[in-house]
Image (tube, rainbow, N blue to C red):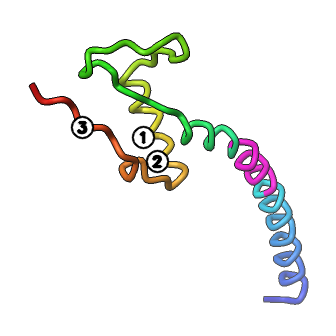
Amino acid sequence: MTHQDAEERVAELERENAHLRQRMDRLEREATSMRPVVQQVKNLQIWDFTPYGVHPDGSWVAVDRACAAELLAALAGVDHWEPWATRIEPRIQK
């Protein structure tokens, strides 16, 4: 490898490094902007009232069961959160 080849290779690596730094900065900004969303989803109070035969008051909203499960699974996949450690109320046995 000649001195000129080495200089060209260093210049190429510096350009690639600058590109990767820009990309990393953008990804870090995106991740930072999503932290409040992730925290709010983690704090959701999901309660399956069906097996209890009761109806929640007007302060609760309905969420599709499959969508809620998919949301928690997606959160677990990206946030390294362990939703399985969250206590789930047992169903009433008849």
Q: CA distance from mark 1 to mark 2?
A: 5 Å
Q: Quadrant of the C terminus?
A: top left
Q: In front here: 18 or 71?
A: 71
The percent position of residue 27, horizontal first and vertical second, equals 73, 51
Question: Where does label 1 land, which residue?
Answer: 73
The three-letter code of the residue at mark 1 reads Ala
- In the figure, is residue 31 to the left or right of 49? right
Q: Residue at x 12, y 30 (%)?
A: 93
Q: CA distance from mark 2 to mark 3?
A: 22 Å
Question: Where does label 3 land, which residue?
Answer: 90
Task: Name above or below for residue 7 compared with residue 50.
Answer: below
Q: Quadrant of the N terminus?
A: bottom right
Query: Which of marks 3 and 2 precedes in the sequence?
Result: 2
Residues shaded magenta: 25-34
Neighbours of disc 2 within 10 Å: few (<14), some (14-19), many (20+): some
Q: Residue at x 88, y 73 (%)?
A: 11
The three-letter code of the residue at mark 2 reads Ala
Neighbours of disc 3 within 10 Å: few (<14), some (14-19), many (20+): few
State if disc 2 and disc 1 touch (CB < 8 Å): yes
The percent position of residue 64, horizontal first and vertical second, equals 41, 18
Most common secondary structure along the magenta stretch = helix
Task: Name above or below for residue 25 compared with residue 68.
Answer: below
Tag shown at residue 76:
2
Q: Residue at x 53, y 49 (%)?
A: 78
